[in-house]
Amino acid sequence: MGILDILQSIIPPAMFFSAPLIFTALGGVFSERSGVVNIGLEGLMVMGAFVGIVFNLTFADVFGAATPWISILAAMIVSAVFSLIHAVASVTFRADQVVSGVAINFLALGLGVFLTKQWYDKGQTDMVSQPFYTLDIPVLGDIPVLGPLFFQNMYLTSYLAIILAVVAWYILYKTPFGLRLRSVGEHPAAADTNGINVYAMRYVAVMISGAMGGLGGSVFALTIALNFSQSTIVGQGFMSLAAVIFGKWHPLGAMGAALFFGFAQSLSVISSSIPFLEDVPQIYLLIAPYVLTILALAGFIGRAEAPKANGEPYIKGSR
Amino acid sequence: MLKTNRLLLLIALLFAAGIILSACGSSNEDGSGEESGGETSDSGENQDGGGDSDFKVGMVTDVGGVDDKSFNQSAWEGLKAFGEENGLEEGKGYDYAQSESDADFMPNLNSLVKADYDLVFGIGFKLTDALNKVAGQNPDTHFALVDAVAEEDNIANITFKEHQGSFLVGVAAAMKTESDKVGFVGGENSELIKKFESGFRAGVASVNPDIEVDVQYAESFGAPDKGKVIASNMYNSGVDVIYHSSGATGNGVFAQAKDIKKNDPSKNVWVIGVDRDQYEEGAIGDDNVTLTSMVKRVDIAVQEVAAQSMNGEFPGGEILEFGLEDEGVSVAKTNEEAMTDEMVEEIDNWKQKIIDGEVEVPSTEEDLEAYLDSL
């Protein structure tokens, strides 16, 4: 196997594996940058996967080929509304954000499985008839070397993930809105003094994380799992959370971390056909992403510093 | 003073009554238990009469629930069929208890035992520990465990010869492949899944020893993303038939196969399903990527054991193995386009050879080596 063949087997799977993680991690960045810890990413993904699948199953005949796109939109909206529970609990009522996030995880899974039972009278939904399919990008796919690596057999959602990561970076670092959002997460009292509505900013940030989590979950469901059951989303939300921290709460960092997870995952599978890796027991390659994350956090990329006010409810008038 | 005395008397009376009544209750229960035992054995010898309605059989599901399109559903269908056959009433004669999490196993088992069920099934290996405990505490009740082996004497252990079914789908894969490369995706690398792998590889090699089998384990039954990455790699490297034995992880395999089929309908990509007929999962437009499935007939096993128990021949402590000869495992032939007559014929040939004992299908890695050497 030549190096090009190897790359060609590694990169496309890494891309579809990473895309849902990137979306969700971006949501996590928004929420945590505003000072609200969001352990509930997993639950938001579950909600997104559930809504995406149910919407797709229900409206496949109406919207035809456009169904998956409308499904992820619906998933974003419902998850954003769902994340309001977390916002109300942790911002308005100053509940412990970790506890509230865990509650979101339980609630989403319970609700999803319960409603599946109610509506379909079984433990898992049927497979959707209109999922996302891979395609070759015209023109770009014909470029020698790069074409087959990055523009053939790809999901459009993978590109969307990368584009949104750049957009998120622009919003957070180049717009007044982003500056306000970050200031609320660093020093809410100072931001409040300057006339920024801390509560409103945090509400918006949590809802963005809900929408992005829903997007991640629905993209996962519509590209990989194709149905919804209790075991559709298991741990992807937490991997996204790890990507947020690994990426130092920076949108592009989080994207890089998510891509890294996908790459490592893909590599562990491909390794059996790569000359110098085939002798390494597969189990080491399977745990490699997690070990590397720990090593990276332990010092290689420097200290991961959270936003100062992350996890602290803001009480107006206190100092 | 007088009032408190009366009160004490009243309480004492209540206690006494309670003790007497509860004693009555238990003796009644014992009596009816013996009665029903006697009656069922009677009916077994004589004829199906009203005695049958005294036999109560229940099952405790795994977390999947009775509509999981897999094990639990199959078991419940078997129980329902058994109930209808013997004129039992749902909810009284036969019933199930749904487990929402692992913590529900013990309470569910206990509640069925308390409700005087004569035979209680535990569906799935996850219930092994809970069943062992409950069976130890209730030596008079019959239990049966599906897909694992427990210790107690009053538990019948229902297992399947998955290697035999896997052997036959291996034959199908070997005949269908054009690239002479097939793949196997396992859930967790365990003794149970090794049975699937060994049988499959033996089946493939029996048709053509030169066919390469690519084996990968996802190390999870609930990771469709890993399943998809593995399938993507396998199909990329020229594999055209993948047999998955990996639960929900297999969804990723189906997703990848369907994606390839969608982009190039002429391409030769197939998936072989597991546990039940996964024909529905493979549908993509007018095509279907599900070649066949290795079906485990939990329903047949459940009916069989329930009937034995009712007739007083409960196989407690024994390990029952359901294989090809009693239809405990079978090969789905739903995809008639893909399964040519030639393939069906060949599969039936091998099936007969296995049933006749001409071919001993290997179920472990060592047996497989020996089998491959003997070819």
Image (cartoon, grey):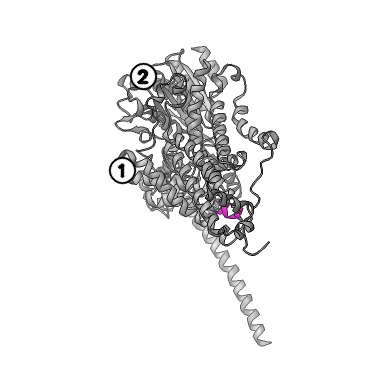
Left or right: residue B213 versus residue B90 is: right
Q: Nearer the viewer, mark 2 or mark 1?
A: 1
Residue type, label 2: Glu
Tell which residue pokes out farthest to the right in this image. Answer: A299
Q: Helix, strand or loop at disc 2?
A: helix
Q: Amino acid at mark 1?
A: Phe
Query: A75 or B293, which lies in front?
Result: A75
Rendered position, A34 above or below B346 = below
- Cα–Cα gap, marks 2 and 1: 45 Å
Q: Nearer the viewer, residue A183 or B117?
A: A183
Q: Is residue A180 left or right of residue B359?
A: right
Q: Position of residue A308 (x, y in %)?
A: 66, 50
The answer to which image quadrant residue A142 occupies is top left
Q: Indicate yes or no whether the magenta region holds residue A202.
A: no
Q: Are marks 2 and 1 in contact (CB under 8 Å)?
A: no
Q: Chain of mark 2?
A: B
Q: Which residues are magenta?
A: A97-103
Residue denoted by label 1: A63
Q: Quadrant of the C terminus of chain A?
A: bottom right
Horizontally, is A275 left or right of B276 in the view? Answer: right
Label the magenta part by its dominant secondary structure.
Answer: helix
Name the one closer to the observer, A307 or B206.
A307
Residue B374, x across and y down, in percent: 51, 12
Q: Secondary structure at mark 1?
A: helix
The reply to whether residue B43 is visible in this rendering is: no
Q: How many marks?
A: 2
Relative to A300, residue B15 above or below = below
Chain letter, disc 1 residue:
A
